[in-house]
Image (tube, rainbow, N blue to C red):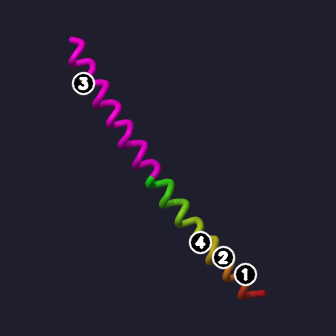
Amino acid sequence: MRSTRNLYEERNFSFGCKRFFSFLKVNEYILHKTVKTTRKLHTYTFLSF
C-alpha cells in the first residue's frame, strides 16, 4: 500500500515539474515576443520623430 502511494506521489511530482517547466517556457516565449514588439515600437517612434 505504501509503495503504491509513493509511486503515485512521485508521478504527481514529475507531472508538476513538467507543468512548471512548460509554464516557464511559455512565459519566456511571451516575454521574448513582448520585448521584440516593444523594441519595434521604440524604433518606429524613434524614426517617426
N-term mark: 3 or 2: 3
Q: Which of labels 4 and 3 is toward the front? A: 3
CA gap, disc 3 and disc 2: 51 Å
- Mark 1 lies on residue: 45
Disc 1 to disc 4: CB gap under 8 Å:
no
The residue to which callout 2 is attached is 41
Q: Which residue is mark 4?
A: 37
Instruction: Say what amino acid the circle numbered 3 marks.
Output: Leu
Q: Give coordinates of residue 17: x percent, y percent.
A: 38, 39
Q: Which label belongs to residue 36?
A: none
Q: Residue at x 38, y 36 (%)?
A: 16
Disc 4, SS: helix
Q: From what the image shows, is residue 44 above or below residue 30?
A: below
Whether pointer 3 and pointer 2 mark residues with C-beta atoms closer than 8 Å, the reply is no
- Kindly indicate the quadrant of the structure image that contains residue 39: bottom right
Contact between marks 1 and 2 (CB within 8 A): the answer is yes
Give the mark toward the camera: 3 or 2: 3
Q: Are marks 2 and 4 in contact (CB under 8 Å)?
A: yes
Q: Residues within 10 Å of mark 2 (few under 14, many from 20)?
A: few
At label 1, the amino acid type is Thr
Residue 29 in the magenta stretch? The answer is no
As rendered, which of 14 and 19 lies closer to the eye? 14
- Relative to 41, say whether 47 is above or below: below
Residues at marks 1 and 4, CA–CA distance in whole angstroms = 12 Å
Please name the residue shown 55% across and 60% down the image.
31
Q: Which residues are magenta?
A: 1-24
Q: Is 30 left or right of 42, judged from the image as shown?
A: left
In the displayed structure, 44 sits above or below 27; it is below
